[in-house]
Amino acid sequence: QVQLVESGGGLVQPGGFLRLSCVASGFSFSSAAMSWYRQAPGKERELVATIAGGSSTNYADSMKGRFTISRDNAKNTVFLQMNSLKPEDTAVYYCNTRITGIYYWGQGTQVTVSS
């Protein structure tokens, strides 16, 4: 019954910005830690950022200072604000949560950074 639906991806120029959204359903969202991962072609999926139910955050070192994860519990939505985008940020971005040891994933949203 867990469902995660990402949106907001697209094509942006280097130095530009995007805000991704993930709408969650089927579980107690406000108490759940949520994460964003990304996967580029030919590469392993990597953690981008995590936000706890209490809204504390953690970021991969390469994302700090450019990306911000946040949540709106009233709307069961987690966001990823991406600024100063670089071509190497090009990837499919996935929303994730873990419930009793089981990982759940959205379908992903494509982010392409290109001039």
Image (tube, grey):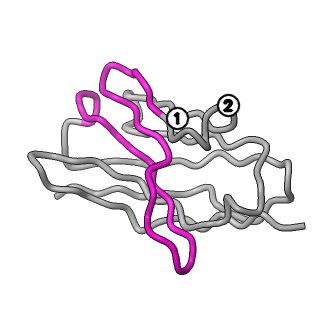
Which labelled disc corresponds to residue 7? none
Q: Residue at x 33, y 28 (%)?
A: 52
The residue mark sitting in front, 1 or 2, is 2
Viewport quadrant of the N terminus: bottom left
Q: Residue at x 28, y 29 (%)?
A: 30
Which labelled disc corresponds to residue 69? 1
Above or below: residue 67 compared with residue 6:
above
Q: Mark 2 points at which residue?
A: 65
Is residue 76 left or right of 14 when viewed as pictured? left
**What's the amino acid at mark 1?**
Ile
Is residue 82 left or right of 25 when viewed as pictured? right
Q: Are marks 1 and 2 in contact (CB under 8 Å)?
A: no
Which SS class for mark 1? strand
Residue at the far front in the pictured view: 61
Residue 97 pos. (x, y %)? 28, 48
Residue 95 pos. (x, y %)? 41, 53
Q: Which residue is drawn at 25% across and 58% down?
A: 104
Residue 40 pos. (x, y %)? 56, 71
Viewport quadrant of the C terminus: bottom right
Q: Separation of disc 1 and disc 2 at Cα? A: 11 Å
Which SS class for mark 2? loop
Is residue 68 left or right of 59 when viewed as pictured? right
Residue at the far right in the pictured view: 115
Which class describes the residues within 10 Å of circle 2: few (<14), some (14-19), or many (20+)? few
What span is in magenta? 29-58
Q: In which quarter of the image is residue 41?
A: bottom right
Residue at the far left in the pictured view: 100
